[in-house]
Amino acid sequence: MTETGLSIDRDSKALQYRILDAGDHWVLERAAPEFSLTPDEFRATELARSMLPTDRRDRIVVPPIVQQEIDAGAGDAISLVVVVNAHVRVFTDAMQTAIDPLIDAMANAAEAFSDAFASAVSSALSSIEPDAGGQDRDAQLPEPIRAARRRREQQRETARRTTGAHYPGDDPHV
């Protein structure tokens, strides 16, 4: 309870509650009402009441699942801090149990998305690569582009023959 900035003594007599057995749950009543609560203890008690259920007489109810986390029984006096800590442990365990399948589902969805994306990219890349028949990339280009490449190649060849010039871009070894 110190995370809220409250300064409370876990063993304070004002925070001691007697456990009463109410059948399927426990009910807590202050064990020593003659001890007054400090302002921080009062605030801590209010926080505990907002976290834990209460009955019609405004007594704190301890559900069976929280009882299992507490090393005490009916008739014992127990600190309200112990009850709140047990409640928080049960709550976090329940949240972890609920969140684990969600995390797994998100991981599976991310993996499926990544697999689908990789497959789509692979498919797109294979459509622009030469097929197994050995065709080159030019065969997949539109005819006007292939015609322009043929004309440019003819112009280069003509220039080589007439001038003897060598274009470094034409030599794969340069």
Image (cartoon, rainbow, N blue to C red):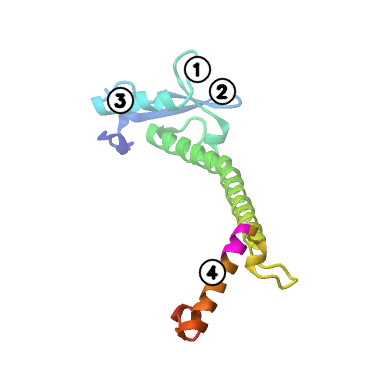
* 140 relative position to 77: left or right: right
- The amino acid pointed to by label 2 is Ala
**Classed neighbour count for the residue bearing mark 1: other residues with Cα under 10 Å, few (<14), some (14–19), many (≥20):** few
Query: Circle 4 sits in a helix, a strand or a loop, which is it?
Result: helix
Toward the viewer: 148 or 100? 148
- Give the residue displayed 65% in from the left and 59% down from the top: 143
Tell me the residue that label 1 is attached to: 55
Task: Measure the alpha-carbon separation of dots 1 and 4.
Answer: 92 Å
Query: For residue 82, what is the image quadrant?
Result: top left
Tell me the residue that label 3 is attached to: 43
Task: Measure the alpha-carbon separation of dots 2 and 1.
Answer: 11 Å
The answer to whether marks 4 and 2 mark residues whose Cβ atoms lie closer than 8 Å is: no
- The amino acid pointed to by label 3 is Arg
Tell me the residue that label 2 is attached to: 22
Task: Measure the alpha-carbon separation of dots 2 and 3.
Answer: 26 Å
- Residue 20 location, x and y as percent? 50, 25
Residue 6: image tag: none
Between disc 4 and disc 2, whose residue precedes? Answer: 2
- Of discs 3 and 4, which sits in the foreground? 4
- Of discs 2 and 1, which sits in the foreground? 1
